[in-house]
Amino acid sequence: MSRPLRIEFPNAVYHIFSRGNERKEIFRSGTDYELFLSILKDTCERFDLVVHAYSLMPSHFHLLLETKDSNLSQAMKRLLGLYTVRFNRLHKRSGHLFQGRYKALLVDKDNYFLEVSRYVHLNPVKANIVQSPEDHPWSSMKYYLKEKAPDFLHRDFTLKSFQSRSDYKRFVMERLKTGEDPFKKVIGGLIIGSEDFLNKLQAKIAKNKKNEFCGKKEFFRKPVDEVTKHLGDYDRNFSVYALWKYARTTQRQIGERFKISHSAVSIAVKRFQSRLSEDKMLRNRVMNFEKVIQKSNVED
């Protein structure tokens, strides 16, 4: 059985992250970094990608990129596959270089793009490799402070929000004072963006029922408040199941809400599912509840 695809559509923006297998180094020398950037440049040309920011670290890398076509999976397969082959040949090794599949978060370009940009550029600073982000030689930050940059790096969209290059650097460094992590706001493990951005994506994807992708179940879940406001007089077992099935929350968070352990949540859900298979009236109640939260979302 083939693995589901990722969410792909024209002009999508992604934060890409991949780590070395067993957290081992994927870059051992300057030659390796240069090799990766060379393959990245070629991949951008072949697949018409736009790289807005990058940061290459010894054991992992971050990319903020945009796809003009729906071809992220093809592009990443070539980038990581070709780099692995050449890295293995260069270092006389074999086997997997990267740890599982790369992670790709869809980024709301209108509201979260700049947050992700400075997150990528601050990575070497937070890892205590350098004190200032432009000092890391294998990051795009230094090019944001210069006139010239590699052909595959596109800075215009980022810099148009600032009066000068130094203003962008100040913006990046400000995050060190607050220490906030934009990825704590990730929706369903797939998206960093606003609810409006998510709703637009859901409407687009719902038109194609056959469009399967990683995390589809989480993608269509609702905000916790959207589910809880309709629970009303439903008993605890129904409420636990409804939050587990329809809300973007974890078993641990559900447990905290009802003052039970996360394992008790799991047991309660399994028992409720067992009841559903035997109780037609209960199934109807669940179906009616689902219609209510779906209708509420549309009206809102």
Image: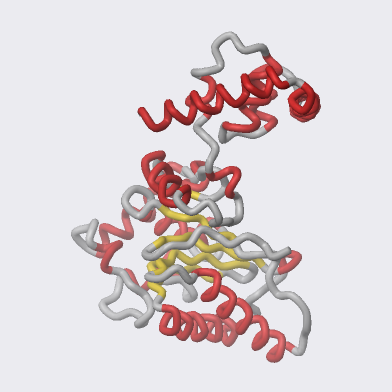
Q: Is residue 234 above or below residue 241?
A: above
Please name the residue shown 26% across and 64% down the image. 165
Where is residue 295? Give x, y as percent: 44, 28
Give the camera-side residue of 1 and 159: 1
Q: How many marks?
A: 0
Across and down, in percent, residue 232 comes to 54, 11
Front residue of 287 and 272: 287
Left or right of 74? Residue 114 is left
Q: Quadrant of residue 20?
A: bottom right
**Is residue 132 visible to the viewer in this orientation of the structure?**
no
Picture residue at 56% right of the left edge, 63% below the top: 17
Q: In the rendered view of the protein, which quadrant contains the N terminus?
A: bottom right
Q: What is the x, y in percent for residue 268? A: 77, 23
Q: Would residue 153 be found to the left or right of residue 191 on screen?
A: left
- Quarter of the rendering containing residue 94: bottom right
Question: Residue 218: horizontal and vertical position, in percent?
Answer: 58, 43
> How are the colours assigned in the image?
secondary structure
- Residue found at x 56% / y 16%: 231
| 78 or 287, nearer to the observer | 287
